Amino acid sequence: MTTPKVLVIDDEEIARISCQRVLKREGIEVRLAAGGREGLEMVVKNPPDLALVDLKMPEMDGVEVVRRIQAHDPNIVSIIITGYATIESAVAVMKQGAYDYLPKPFTPDELLIVVKRGLEKRRLDRESRALREEKEAMERNFVTMVTHQLRSPLSAIMQYFEVMLGNIGGELTDNQREMLERAQQRLQGLLDLINDWLDMSRMQPGDIVSRLRPIAVAECVEAALAALEHAGRDRGITVSSELTPNLPPIHADLQSLKEVLANLVANAVNYNRDGGQVRVRARDLGQQVAIDVEDTGYGIDAKEIPFIFDQFYRGKDKDARRRPGTGLGLAIAQKIVRAHGGTISVSSELGRGSTFTVEIPAASGDVKAGRDAQALP
Amino acid sequence: MAAKGKILIVDDDPDFTKSTKMILLADGYEVVTASDGKQGLEKVREAVPDVIILDIMMESLFEGFSLVTSLRSDPNFAPYQSIPILMASSVRSDTGSRFAFDDAEDMGNLPEPDDYLDKPFKPRELLERIGQLMARKNR
């Protein structure tokens, strides 16, 4: 660690000199100022780690000096030196941002204890700031890293599969084709996982909150179903919607809420049995509108329900496991719904099907929805 | 048989270049390749392609765009100005816009390519898009 720097601002020369003598012995670099103005100049030119400031000085009192030091750089640790009679002023100066105070007269040991504790605080502050900055940089870089460094090579591999399975590199035997198709599916699963992961880390609840506005439930449901119309066709699964007429508008972000519904419908198709059904319904609950996505699929074991919204959690059911999935879809859905100030829940019966319910605040009812959502982490 | 047209692939990933080239060759196109923006511009002059497939994320994001800028607005490249550009990237365009940038200002006033396709290419989709760009060029 670099030599700690302490600035002593005191109008009494004897006090300055004795502080200097004690601190220098500990390997601390000490500079001295005889008044507030001189001291503040030194703070600006060469900021110390810690400033010892005498409370009673003729030119500018210690409270003002500390206030200005803190205004210039709040990370400098200020310690006020004060006589017994002025404890109250010491409290006042603590309110201006001083870290500690040292009553006069003090012994060298007392001085050292207070200064060392102040320097330790400074070191910890610095460390935690550096760590926080590092963490933020890592999070930012992580997204970039994942996008480019992972997606690019996987996409390159995927395109080779496309070429080979398109018989462009020559005719394949049935065996080769089957193996390549399996490999391609596994790779697609990995790409899906990375995409979901990126969605999860990029999504800022604040962004959603800022886009909340009154929208029609039907518009949102239709937008969600548009891309999924034929999703279950090859397995004979039908997708239908029944919306109660005269639903109130909801306070929502169309783009992200549409993704939630599309995700729930895609799940309802994915984890359904062949020939099954998916129904989307909406109900007016007064303050909220509930949107139900009901399927006739495998269902979820009651024991598993508390975990299904967790990141990377996947059901234990063997049939369900065989279906593609990243374990992130519901976690993303929950994050989005919560940013809306809403809730997402599920009721399910093993072997018969599940109903996922999203409740979103009605636009006319509770205009506080956006503000409530902002309070969420 | 005469080639259907000449396609220039500008991409720094040799595997992408190779598999894309195979798709195009199998469909009867002639293919020229370049592995960076500078080489790409040289190949534009030399080979005069009908369509350019350009990777947006080469060395830097800027490399792809600077090639587009040169082609579209540099007087030295005036004869090649109207060659259609299909821009490609494995960065998913997921924000509703065609380009996935966090900050719209990153785009500035950069010229838009003629079309955009996410990597990995599906052979049929790629050939469809190329066909459309060829048709546009010949119009």
Image: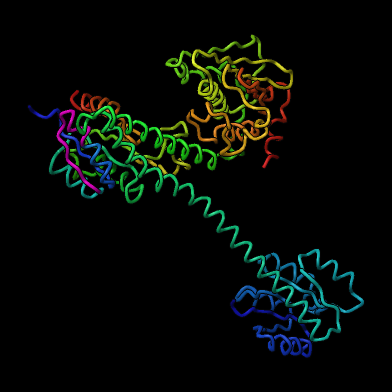
Residue at horizontal 13%, vertical 40%?
Answer: B47
Position of residue A48 relative to residue B65, above or below, is below
Q: Is residue A60 left or right of residue A172?
A: right
**Picture coordinates of residue B35, whole percent (x, y):** 24, 48
Residue at horizontal 14%, vertical 27%?
Answer: B4
Q: Nearer the viewer, residue A319 or A373?
A: A319
Q: Nearer the viewer, residue A263 or A321?
A: A321
Residue stretch in magenta: B22-35
Q: Is residue B26 magenta?
A: yes
Position of residue B126 relative to residue A22, above or below, is above
Q: Is residue A272 left or right of residue A151?
A: right
Q: Quadrant of the N terminus of chain A?
A: bottom right
Q: Nearer the viewer, residue B124 or B114?
A: B124
Q: Is residue A377 magenta?
A: no
Position of residue A54 relative to residue B119, above or below, is below
Q: Quadrant of the C terminus of chain A?
A: top right
**Picture coordinates of residue A289, whole percent (x, y):** 68, 20
Numbered circles on residues, count: 0
Residue B112 shows in the view: no
Residue B2: quadrant of the picture: top left
Residue A373: quadrant of the picture: top right
**Picture coordinates of residue B55, whole percent (x, y):** 30, 42
